[in-house]
Amino acid sequence: MILLSTGLSTSIMMPTRKFLSLAAITLGTSAMTLAAPFSLSPAPTTVGMVDEASFLKEFRQAMEIGAQDQMQKLIKQDMEGAVIAIIRLCESNSSAPNDKSESEIDALRIAWSGGQKTRFVEKVYEYYSLMDNATRPERYKLVSRYYAALSNLLKAEKDKDITVIKSLGADFKGIAAGLVMVGDHYYASQAWLSYGRSQDEAQRGPEANLREAAIGYEKCLEHREKVDLKDLYYTQTKERFETLVAQGYGKDGDVGKPGSDKPGKGTGGIGSSLGAPLSVPMTFVVEPDFVSIERPFWSNDEVYSTWTNVVFKGIASASPFPILDEIKLSRDTIQSFEVESAGQKNAFSMSGKFTPCEIVLGEAKLPWAFVAVTGTQEDIFQGVTTNMQPSDTQMTVYIAPASKITGILGDIPIEVFDDTMSGAYGDAPVPWGHLGMSPGKFMTDFDSIRIDGSKHALPWSRYQKVGDIWYDMAVAGHTLTAAPLEIKTGKLKLNFKGPSPKYVIVKGKHNLGDCYFDLTSEKKGLEVPIGEYELFAGFVSDGKRTAIKKVVILPGKNTPSWKVEEGGTTEVKLGAPFGFDFESEDLGDHVKVLGESVVVTGVADERYERPWNSRPSPMASLRKAGSKKGSKPEKMKSTIDQDTLYKNWGLGFHPQDLDLVKKKDLEDGFEIQLTEKKNKLFGKIESSWKPGT
């Protein structure tokens, strides 16, 4: 979740622009398959643009003469233009209400409900009217990020660049999750639709992941239904989704997971069966201790200032719960909030201490829990004292996972944690669009499994070794299914120079796509199924309590993958020497090094994002392209005051911009280098000389 401020944020409007259209792109199956292609337009040709101004011009003309039939006809003829026009009008009117906009929105509402028989306009109007000033800028960033990713997807589809298409899937998934959290179901639907496309056959051919495509399309439909929008996208997405479900790729189908089967059955084509699957009943337990057991999620420490949070305004205000739409939150006193879920209501009082909050979920009313805490008058955020204590006008509640189920597999005790806070155990990793991450980069939390009382839990993986036996595992409700297997294996051995990582998690490729393994768990080399692996995520942390220093590890553009052969050991080299990735702007007489673009990188081009108590403060130098000597280094400041932080909390994770004077001898080309002699976490960091832009 993106960290929200204490209500001191400003209102940001979406700039006027033409909107990228999805309608001209073909999705779904390739010509090699039997099913019909999924197209989002009757006659897909080239990438188009949506210009809502054209629709509005004709609609206003019909409105002036009271031509109700014509207004309905215009909506039917250009529904995409109508949708964007409605969104734009409602958005602008929410910030600057006026009679003209209200009249046009009302005319659109009457024409839409008369012709389309849905409440889409009313729902959009209500959403923007109730939006607060803390949500508005966060939504703006997410929508902007969506359009940037969509532009990249359209270009990659045109260029038939499958590598880029595959990489954009995680971007759309993270953007969709963020949009759900800010309540924008229309754009969440669009993002999920793009996610589905990034997985489908028309875009990826034989490398398609049709089960994930079905997930994307299903969520697209779900969020369109929340705003009562049954447009052409809805109709054709539904057709494609139903086709995939009929082919077995739905959530209850038997195909589509890596290995074309359901997890837990031992029929995924990985290894050979050692017997029938075991069914293990599990018992729910509240786990309020999120520190003594190492688990692979960012909030696995007491620094709640960086946790996922829920922001309330005054008494009786409501706020969405991250991920779980079925949970409804409302503030009932200055220091407490109420949780409504599965028909039950529970109130929780915040006293400044970590408080376990146990509720029930779903029709089965299964128990579930999270930890909550509120701030104080003297919280520390990146070295700056901040007042996060609840007041009459705002209350920020920081939340962390606290649910686990326990049982015995064979004769070995196991615990499975819902650390993604999705309400289920053994789920796929969940990406978050937190502040401090580079644009298009997302931090991932994992469900985890603790085996035989270990103090270091492992990321949940479909294939997991428990004791001496490999299992194909899945969880449904509070029951674990585990099929014993004989698997051919090799080893991945981590060679990491620098601060000791807490987790380095690799993800399997191809038929190992549901596999996540932590390389820090075995110093002599971790046994894994044979196949190919890529860096997926990780965490580095050092210190305790408020003095903790930590970062997120992510792959870079050029981070390699690693192949594991039977009986062999493959080295995974990460860490030092550390460098910087960064961007700059050539402004004629000077060069601006952009502080928010500065990221520490490692030997495999891996990235170290979201630095906490360890943000870089490099020295920057210019030189003529190809020369050996640079200018006198100048420092990029990393200090920040309280007022600046309140205006933009993201500035707490980066150095400030730096302007460097550009001398005349640099007009034909220049290079920039960033260096830091002794970073708090990484020690020496030195970038290569990077050409200026």
Image (tube, rainbow, N blue to C red):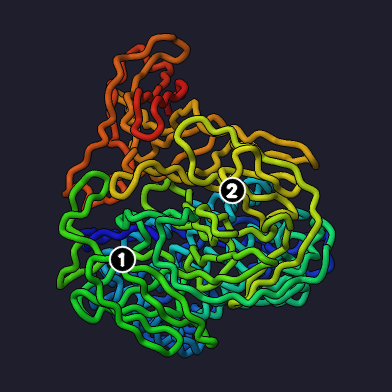
Report the amino acid beneath label 2: Asp
Q: Is residue 404 left or right of residue 266?
A: left
Q: Is residue 62 visible?
A: no
Residues at marks 1 and 2, CA–CA distance in whole angstroms: 28 Å
Q: Is residue 478 above or below residue 213?
A: below
Which residue is tagged 1?
Answer: 354
Q: Quadrant of the N terminus?
A: bottom left
Tell me the element at label 1: loop
Q: What is the secondary structure assignment of the residue under circle 2?
A: strand
In front of the other: 347 or 103: 347
Q: Are marks 1 and 2 in contact (CB under 8 Å)?
A: no
Q: Nearer the viewer, residue 656 or 622?
A: 656
Vertical side of 593 occupied by 249: above or below: below
Where's residue 14, x and y in %?
Answer: 35, 60
Looking at the image, residue 678 sits to the left or right of residue 279; the answer is left
The structure residue drawn at horizontal position 39% and vertical position 36%, both measured from the top left corner, is: 598
> In the image, 133: left or right of 473?
left
* Residue at (76% x, 72% y) in the render: 254
* Residue 292 percent coordinates (x, y): 42, 56
x and y percent of residue 298 in the render? 43, 53
The residue lying at 40 percent from left, 63 percent from top is: 289
Residue placed under numbered mark 2 in the picture: 518
